[in-house]
Image (cartoon, helix red, strand yellow):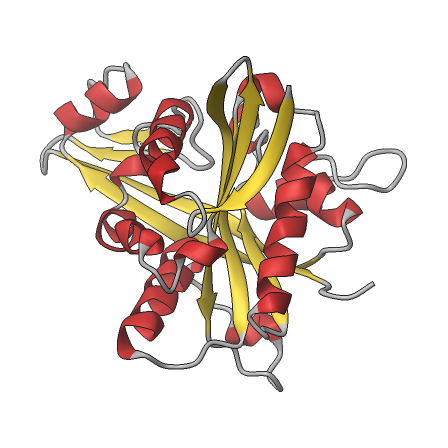
Amino acid sequence: MTVELVSLRERPDLLGKADELVASLWPTFVLKDPVAGRYWPKLSSPSLAPFQALAVETGSGTQTVVAFANAVPFALDRDGDPATMLPDDGWDGVLRDGVELMLRGEQANALSALAITVHPAQRGSGLAERLIGAMKQAALTAGLSTLVAPIRPTRKALYPLQSFDEYCAWTRADGLPFDPWIRTHSRLGARIVKVALRSMTVSGTVASWEAWTGLRFPATGCYAVPDALAPVRIDRAANTGTYVEPNLWMKHPLSG
């Protein structure tokens, strides 16, 4: 079987399968982000579809979407320091700003990765690296000068007691980042720019959070939940649960 990379502009008929892959692999509470709910569907619009890449596995007369990579063009001050110019609200901020820029018909000069979702059977195959390469090529083709990414470290949820900043700074004996996803980007030449501590905010009732996580929250307090990068704050009196997810901004070279 072969795996081919195509853009959503080339294969809009595969959007449903790609969305099914995302829904099956991401934590339910992440999919409840209101900013994503408002802006994510716009990524399939004609002006943004070229920046959405699908990995399609072909064999025995069938085609299966085994990965979906999403990115959005946005405006970044060319002469400014990325540490101050990249939005502090990370993923939410760049998705919102990029889509709003497109809706206004204004010119972007940078591309931000949003997500790379890979089927478990394809993990470790180098497919994620190919998809990052496809993002770089899409940026160059569109005449954009910068590629950045608000990284969601894959193993942070396993270390709920460590602060996000501390975890992201961990390294292995060889000097490479401890976290596998940060390490993947680092090996491709990306450098850490800054932490975005409020990259995504998800709120819901206590009952909603119990349904999303399969846990029970009998008292007000902060709870570590599976796949969460930060605690979920439960307020029984107000009947609310709030999750604020941090991300790590990294910047990729577009040459070399």
**Residue most toward the front?**
61
- Is 252 left, or right, of 158 in this rendering? right
Q: Quadrant of residue 17?
A: top left
Q: Is residue 107 above or below residue 90?
A: below
Give residue 68's position: percent from left, percent from top.
Answer: 48, 38
Which residue is at a point 38% across and 35% down the rendered structure image?
14
Q: Quadrant of residue 238?
A: top left
User: Who is closer to the viewer here, 103 or 112?
Assistant: 103
Give residue 4's position: percent from left, percent from top.
Answer: 60, 35
Q: Is residue 144 above or below residue 121?
A: below
User: Who is closer to the viewer here, 70 or 215?
Assistant: 70
User: Who is closer to the viewer here, 9 or 52?
Assistant: 9
Give residue 119's position: percent from left, percent from top.
Answer: 52, 23
**Residue most toward the right?**
174
Q: Is residue 254 above or below residue 235?
A: below
User: Who is closer to the viewer here, 93 or 127?
Assistant: 127
- Is 73 left, or right, of 190 in this rendering? left
